[in-house]
Image: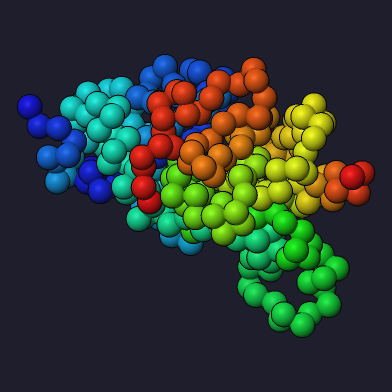
Amino acid sequence: MKSVKDLSTIKLDDNKVEIEKEENVSSADRLNAYVKAIKEVKKED
Amino acid sequence: MEISKKDIIFELVNTENNLDKLQNCPHREVGDLSVIYKFLVSKNDTNRMTLPITNEIAEKIEASEEELFEVAYNNTKEITPFKILSMREMLMGNMFPDGISEDDPMLDMLLPPDDIGMYVLSNEGGLKGACGILYSDLLGEFADKFEADLIIIPSSIHEVIILPDIDLFNDKDMIRSMVSEINEGVVAEEDRLSNNIYLFDRENREIKPIFDDVPSISDSDSLTKNNTI
C-alpha cells in the first residue's frame, strides 16, 4: 500500500471535488481594536 | 485534476464552531482548536484556491492523519513562510498597502508606536496564518529574544497577537471579556479562532491555556513539542 509520502502526484476527479476560493482580507479593524483595548489595560495599571 | 503531496498544507480552526465540517475530514484537536488539511491548488497576491482534504480524499490517497500532519507541517512553513512583525509594521502594511513615506505625519496619527509591546504572528499574505503557533521554534526564538514567556491572543484564523509582557494581564476575567467582545463586535464569524488566550512557556517550549477550563494544547498531542521550524 502506498502512503501519501510515496505519492508524487495524486489524481482527483474534477467533478467530485469542491475547490474553495480564499481571499486576503485586511486585519486592520480587529488589530486596531486590540491596540485600543490593550492601551486601556495599560492605562488602568 | 492532478495534485502533489507538496501541496498539502494545514490551518487552524475553532473546534466547536466547525463540528459539522470536522466530522467529514481528518483533523487533530489541539486545545479548543483543530488542525485541518488542504491541497493548495493555486495562489497569488490577493487570494488562493484550496481543496479541503475530506475523509473521502484521505482514503483515496491512503493517508492517515499522522501522515497528513507530518507532510503539511513541512510544507506549510515553506509555501507560506511565517513572520512576526511589530503591531506598527503589521498595521502599516494593512492600512497602506501601496507604501507610505516614513516621515508622513499620518503614520503617528494612525499607528501605534513601535514600543507598545504588541507583535503579530502571521504568514506571507496574511491568509490562514494563525497556524504559525504550531511551530515551537518560531515562538521559542521570539521568547528568547525577550527572555520572557509570551501571551498569545488568537485574534483570528489569519493571525495571532503576541505580547511578551505576561504581567500585563492580572485580571483574567477582564481578558476573556475583552477577547469575546472584539470577536463578536469586529471579527467576521468565519474568521474567529478562539475566545481564549494562551501562554507560551519559554522554558518548556509549550503552549498552555491561561484559563483552567480550556483543554491544554500541549496535553492534546504535544503538538508544540519536538516540532522544529
**Rendering coords of residue B219 (x, y %):** 46, 23
Residue drawn at x 31%, y 22% as measured from the top left:
B55
**Rendering coords of residue B84 (x, y %):** 56, 57
**Rendering coords of residue B20 (x, y %):** 48, 17
| Left/right of residue A35 with respect to residue B76 in the rendered view | right
Residue drawn at x 66%, y 34% as measured from the top left:
B197
User: Is residue A33 visible from the viewing direction of this image?
Assistant: no
Where A9 sits versus B103, above or below? above
Tell which residue pokes out farthest to the left in this image.
A1
| Left/right of residue B194 with respect to residue B2 in the rendered view | right
Where A43 sits versus B70, above or below? below
- In front: B150, or A28? B150
User: Is residue B195 visible from the viewing direction of this image?
Assistant: yes
Tell which residue pokes out farthest to the right in this image.
A44
Where B38 sits versus B220, above or below? below
Quarter in which the N terminus of chain B is drawn: top left
Q: Quadrant of residue A45?
A: top right
**Rendering coords of residue B181 (x, y %):** 79, 33
| Left/right of residue B25 with respect to residue B60 in the rendered view | right
Q: Quadrant of residue B147?
A: bottom right
Residue drawn at x 42%, y 17% as measured from the top left:
B23
